[in-house]
Amino acid sequence: MAAATTSTASPASTAASAPARTPTGPLLVINPNTTAAITTLLLQHAQATAGPGVAVRAVTARFGAPYIACEASHAVAAHAALDAMRQALAAEGPPPCAVLIGCFGDPGLWALRERSAAPVTGLAEAAFAEASRHGRFAVVTGGERWPPMLRRLAQALGHDAALCGILAVAPTGAQMAADPAAAERVLVDACREAVDTGARAIIVGGAGLAGLAARLQPMVPVPLIDSVAAGVRQALALAADPAATRVAAGHAPPSDSGWIPVAPV
């Protein structure tokens, strides 16, 4: 079963944005890579954004890559995310109010949305939507193979016209999460370069970069958007909207009873 971590937050937690209606179930955050430290980081920052009134549960993929940084690992991560969600839904406890894919690349977004009764979003989808409200925006992320993948996703989500640049620095998000001080120096330079492209906002994208946007903001003259915080805000906004919940609309996800299981046991 996928490893799971749950947090209910302390009264000192800071909520960046609260939904109009308190969710009745936890926010399920799926880390589609196999690195438990990234799951812990996601849980920490997701809970801080959600606030003390929302439980957050985070699960780690049972198989796949330790970090998603290429087409092949992204493809496997979509399967791993589906598997992790299925395992989480089969566990005891209340069903999630929403599901957040904790990877800036949203592997399996449409597949999870098809299989879930709760609304589903991803770090990239949510961050693109939030950044586009400022006008033209850029993305700064880790891993040199991400730009064509992110451009394709932005086009599929309808944000390609507003996306004015993707700056992918050489270290991966996992490497930067392991050395935040070094990451700050690299990311500040990339953010300043993004400003020169005409960006009115910049997404600091990636689970491994959670929390860095706030630390970089004093050194960058345009708004920086933390993709994890944006993902939580979007997921909880969807959870607060009855129209976004398939069960409330009377639609059940399709059955997979005829499938032959291929995930590890």
Image (cartoon, rainbow, N blue to C red):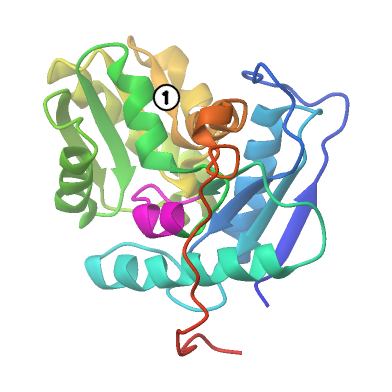
> In the rendered structure, does residue 108 fall within the stretch colored magenta?
yes
Residue 102 at x, y = what percent?
50, 50
Residue 241 at x, y = what percent?
57, 26
Over which residues does the magenta segment extend?
Answer: 102-114
- Quadrant in which residue 60 is drawn: bottom right
Which quadrant is home to the C terminus?
A: bottom right
Which quadrant is home to the N terminus?
A: bottom right
| Left or right relative to 210: residue 201 | left
Residue pictured at 42% horizontal, 65% vertical: 67
| Left or right relative to 177: residue 89 | right
Residue 132 at x, y = what percent?
28, 19
Residue pictured at 40% horizontal, 21% vertical: 224
> Does residue 171 lie above or below 13 as drawn?
below
> In the rendered structure, does residue 157 fall within the stretch colored magenta?
no
The residue where tag 1 is placed is 225
| Left or right relative to 65: residue 136 | left
- Quadrant in which residue 49 is drawn: top right
Dot 1 falls on a residue whose secondary structure is: strand
Return the residue nearer the eye: 204 or 243.
Answer: 243
Q: Is residue 175 visible?
A: no
Return the residue nearer the eye: 21 or 2.
Answer: 21
- Quadrant in which residue 145 is drawn: bottom left
Return the residue nearer the eye: 76 or 219.
Answer: 76
> Does residue 122 lie above or below 15 as drawn?
below
Circle 1: residue type: Ile
